[in-house]
Amino acid sequence: MSDRRRTELLDEQTGRLKKALKRFDILFLIIAAVIGLETLGQVSVFGGEALTWLVILAVTFLIPYALMFAEVGAAFSEEGGAYTWVRNAFGRVAGAIASLLTWVTQPIWVGGSMAFLAAETVNTYLLHLPHGSAADYVFKIAFIWCTVLAAIVSLRRGKWLPTSGAMLKLVLLAFFVLTTVLYAAEHGVEGLGGGDLSPTLAGLFGLAPVLLFAFLGFESSNSAAGEMENPARDVPISIARSSAAAALCYILPVLAILLVVPKDDITGISGLLEAVGVVFSVYGPAAGTLRTIAAIGFVYILMSQGAAWMIISDRMQAIAAADGAFFGGFFGRFHPGSVPPSASTCCPGSSRPSSCWRPCR
């Protein structure tokens, strides 16, 4: 495909994008992508030093990383995010490789660990779902396709799955931390001495990869920058707020887990729900119902987290395809029905710039 044809196809497809993301949406899309509840138990297994490494990596990695992508995301606001950034710096081939490496992990992650973790949660806390049974396969397939549908429908509709999941995530974590305070006042807590907080080399090698992975994703929202109302203004503010939320949403729940669950009893990815089962005992007869609600919320949050990454990575890959990086643009076509009636005009003299979906040339 010639460069001219690539440019024409990319302009045609990006002209079909509709401005559907406001600052509110960007903030919760990032929160949905970055804060992973499944990570809390894995981190807590390492005991008190997990808190130490969380603080160290938040200062040395999370803050600089967020600042860097707040700047890049505001300065380069084309649809496609990392693909367009790498392409502009190193060329189309390098951009295509970066896009592919970002995208290819998502189907494996969503269809692998996230679907299996959701199924295990249902089997343990909600309904009998034997491994390898027909019901198990049906549930996992439905889980996967819900994330896929959120990515392929228009963003003004698909965004509500990650947005609602992010809100529920914050509510669940806040309720869990508050309940831990009530539990501590009634039953006491596990002791955490100064020695427990001392960082070790084994802790570094065990925790750093998990925490670095957990903190990734602040660049993700720019994959849909062409569908934001004002990315130059909204991206930096959304990243600043979501990075602060991410730090608190990892540090406070991990501290709560360590205070109520003995270290030897924490079993990886199920650590959060184990802690929920312990602290919810303060609610007496309602504890079982509340834990069931928490388990349902956990499954929904996992689905919303997968949807956030599918929305992000699919848009990056679609722009790479529309730019001629994959299969001559075949996979880079947006549905023409998403174009608003006034999309072909630049609305000269309009007092509402947001009514123009494409810039004047």
Image (cartoon, helix red, strand yellow):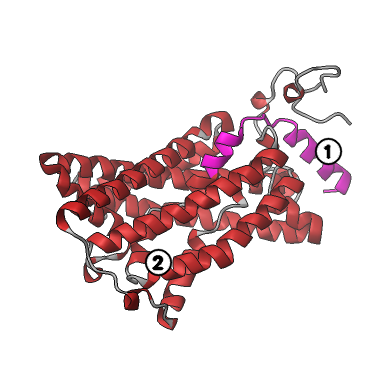
Which residue is at a point 60% across and 36% down the rendered structure image?
Answer: 23
Which residue is at a point 59% across and 59% down the rendered structure image?
Answer: 63
Q: Secondary structure at mark 1?
A: helix
Looking at the picture, how far across and down is residue 206, in whole percent?
Answer: 42, 75
Looking at the picture, how far across and down is residue 265, in whole percent?
Answer: 21, 67
Which residue is at a point 56% across and 57% down the rendered structure image?
Answer: 104
| Res. 85 image quadrant | bottom right
Looking at the picture, how far across and down is residue 1, in whole percent?
Answer: 82, 48
Q: Which residues are magenta?
A: 1-29
Q: How many marks?
A: 2
- Label ID, residue 8: 1
Taking 283 as reference, is 354 left or right? right
Q: Nearer the viewer, mark 1 or mark 2?
A: 2
| Res. 18 image quadrant | top right
Query: With respect to residue 11, does 241 lie above or below?
Result: below
Q: Residues within 10 Å of mark 1 (few under 14, many from 20)?
A: few
Query: With respect to residue 198, does 139 lie above or below?
Result: above
For this rendering, which residue is in front, 107 or 203? 203
Query: With respect to residue 3, does 261 lie above or below?
Result: below
For this rendering, which residue is in front, 356 or 31? 31
| Label 1 – label 2 distance at C-alpha | 51 Å
For this rendering, which residue is in front, 115 or 268? 268
Taking 53 as reference, is 299 left or right? left
Viewer can see residue 315: no
What's the amino acid at mark 1? Answer: Glu
Q: Is residue 24 covered in magenta? A: yes
Viewer can see residue 109: yes
What's the amino acid at mark 2? Answer: Leu
Q: Which residue is mark 2?
A: 51
